[in-house]
């Protein structure tokens, strides 16, 4: 019989389902580790979001009310500020897609390149995105 001290806050689930599958204590350890990993992902997402917001502000724009087009190469340079590992703009874009940052919407292609779309939570409906113009570093030498 499994010791009831090993049950988590999901006691009914633990007792009626998990206890039939395996050791409750071991399964709770796995659950705790996975929860920690999810929290780490959430923290990473927050750090990257704050980095993007800070750079939008540095571009004399408002991240909460604005609708912006940010060149992929520029946003990759921004992300390099918070990530220690170097990556190409393509890899940074793939990474950004995994973070689930609500304001950071899909990429779009224009004649002058690829852009990420940032839409602040207080952005008026039907707004037209403005381009963020900044000096884009030569990232090939950075990666």
Image: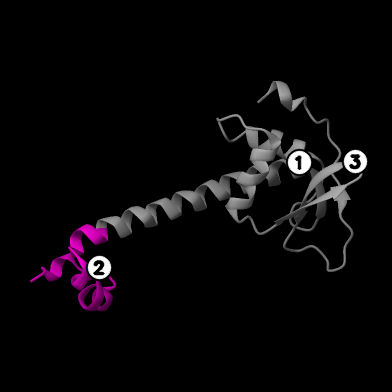
In the rendered view of the protein, which quadrant contains the C terminus? top right
At mark 2, the secondary structure is loop
Tell me where residue 17 sits by quadrant.
bottom left
- Identify the residue at image location x=79%, y=45%: 70
User: Between tags 1 and 2, which lies in front?
Assistant: 1
Write the start and end of the magenta stretch as one range. 1-28
Spatial separation of the CA atoms under disc 2 and disc 3: 54 Å
Sequence-earlier tag: 1 or 2: 2
Residue 18 x, y percent position in the rendering: 24, 70
Nearer-the-camera pick, 124 or 5: 5
Tell me where residue 139 sits by quadrant.
top right
- Identify the residue at image location x=62%, y=32%: 87
At mark 3, the secondary structure is loop
Instruction: Farthest residue to the top: give it.
Output: 141
At mark 1, the secondary structure is helix
| Residue for badge 3 | 112
Query: Does residue 109 appear left or right of residue 30 in this picture?
Result: right
| Residue for badge 1 | 72
């Amino acid at each position: 019989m499994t010791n009831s001290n090993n049950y988590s806050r999901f006691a009914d689930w633990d007792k009626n389902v998990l206890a039939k599958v395996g050791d409750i204590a071991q399964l709770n350890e796995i659950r705790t580790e996975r929860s920690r990993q999810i929290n780490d992902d959430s923290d990473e997402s927050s750090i990257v979001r704050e980095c993007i917001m800070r750079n939008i502000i540095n571009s004399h724009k408002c991240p909460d009310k604005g609708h912006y087009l940010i060149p992929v190469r520029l946003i990759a340079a921004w992300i390099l500020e918070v990530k220690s590992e170097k990556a190409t703009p393509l890899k940074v874009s793939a990474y950004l897609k995994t973070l689930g940052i609500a304001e950071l919407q899909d990429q779009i292609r224009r004649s002058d390149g690829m852009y990420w779309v940032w839409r602040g939570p207080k952005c008026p409906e039907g707004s037209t995105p403005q381009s963020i113009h900044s000096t884009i570093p030569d990232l090939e030498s950075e990666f």
